[in-house]
Amino acid sequence: MIKNMIQSAGLLVLLWLLFGDFVLVWFHNRVKTETYNNQYSSKEDAPDGQDQRCFCHLTGVLDDCFCDIESIDVFNNFKIYPRIQKLTESDYFRYYRVNLNRPCPFWADDSHCSIKDCQVEPCPESKIPVGIKSGNYNRYSQVANANTDIVDCEQAQDLGAINSTLSNYSKEAFEDWARHDDAQDHFCELDDETSPDADYVDLLLNPERYTGYKGPSAWRVWNSIYEENCFKPRSVYRPLNPLVPPRGGDDDGEGFYNWLEGLCLEKRVFYRLISGLHSSINIHLCAEYLLAEGWGKSLWGPNVQEFRQRFDPAETKGEGTRRLKNLYFLYLIELRALSKVAPYFDRAFVNLYTGDRQEDRATKELLLQFFNETKAFPMHFDEKSMFAGQKIEAKTLKEEFRLHFKNISRIMDCVGCSKCRLWGKLQTQGLGTALKILFSEKEIKNLPEHSPSKGFQLTRQEIVALLNGFGRLSTSIHQLHSFRALLKEKR
């Protein structure tokens, strides 16, 4: 008890420096929790033991890093979540160009979801901001951003008119950038934004939620990701795999986690990233569940029973807590990437161009404020601990890591539900972009101040996926707070 109180006091000092007065509320709750846990010797003795067991072990320092869950909760819910929500509602970040018609490259896909909530409504051309439709040229053109004459959406299709606003130097710089970008080693299979099958989607009008897509088709996708791309031999059995018959005592996960702990850090991190992404998606589905369907309007909201089924240790043989911790680990990875990419956007000539000068300036200012918050977090994941061995071995492992993740991004084209495919592709690309940033430290440090870089670039598609993908993680952690309150109410 005394040891726990000392640890809490030290954490209070740190958080006070970071976040101010609201930490007092959090600290009061933490002390109350410590007293509560000591008062009841077991979860069965506690009056709300069953309702709170989803969270009873979700505490303390995460594996493979030096950050605790409580600090992430406070930082995210008070500092990050409000800002990322506002950012992703802006025009620049709400429109995402994606090809949802690419065939599955791994098996015959005959499982397209016919449920109406699976469908994605593409955005009409007339609704898309002129600067977004006009392409990447405008990203580096302050002249184009000052051009107030382009107001008609139809004019946006005339790329020649927009190109004429660029100086010869800017054109050469852009073309040089484009050639380099085509040659870069991406962590994701990027959609061709010029394809006639690619559509702009308004993410705010197509929210991620439970659509009814489940069963063998959905299991097949996740099984392929875990079994074939997470460096796992077939002789090691993943716990609670719905496509493999139960193995009695061998199905408790101990063999799997003993194997996992024996892996090198990089492969262990890879599994935890995928598990964290899976957990985040499951939280979104539980939080936005179809509760009732009536004439003209459906009722969506949190489903506590569904949440328990996916995360309660008693329902998942202890897996639930591990899944949630992996979500926090993934959050730290992407948070670190955002803090490192800030210099890329600090440069004055990088514009978040939509064609509306006033909104573009406000969005850029909000983004830079957001980056300042990410840089202020004191317990970032240290990516330098990865791929730090012998140069040849490290390079080989890094390439293997990249190709495995790229393969996972291709599997997203096998998801039968269009809305699930949309958000799966976006969040996978967001994570892939974060990994690209983490492993481009030298290139980011050497960015030129007044021109595009040959060493590191981000497409608009990557930028939108990066911020929206992290926004989904931030929302997941915020939703855990809501589920905790709902479980208390149900006791």
Image: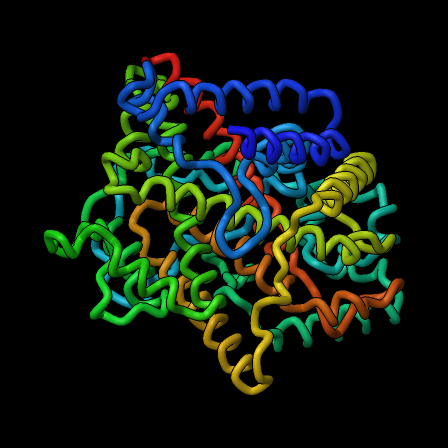
Q: Quadrant of residue 462?
A: bottom right
Question: Can residue 409 be seen here?
Answer: yes
Name the residue furthest front: 2
Q: Which residue is drawn at 44% across and 38% down?
A: 121
- 216 vs 267, left or right, is left
- 9 vs 188, left or right, is right
Residue 178, position in %: x, y? 69, 71
Where is 181 relative to 358, above or below?
Answer: below
Q: Nearest the camera: 271 or 61?
A: 61
- 58 vs 222, left or right, is right
Give the quarter of the figure containing the C terminus: top left
Residue 447, position in %: x, y? 81, 67
Q: Which residue is drawn at 52% across and 30% down?
A: 478
Q: Which residue is drawn at 38% across and 63% down?
A: 261
Q: In which quarter of the image is residue 350?
A: bottom right
Q: Nearest the camera: 458 or 45?
A: 45
Residue 490, position in %: x, y? 33, 13
Q: Nearest the camera: 315 or 252?
A: 252
Question: Can residue 162 be seen here?
Answer: no
Residue 26, position in %: x, y? 60, 23
- Colouring mode (rainbow / by chain / secondary structure / one colour): rainbow
Name the residue furthest bottom: 392
- 397 vs 9, left or right, is left
Number of numbered markers: 0
Q: Which residue is drawn at 21% across and 50% down?
A: 252
Q: Nearest the camera: 421 or 223?
A: 223
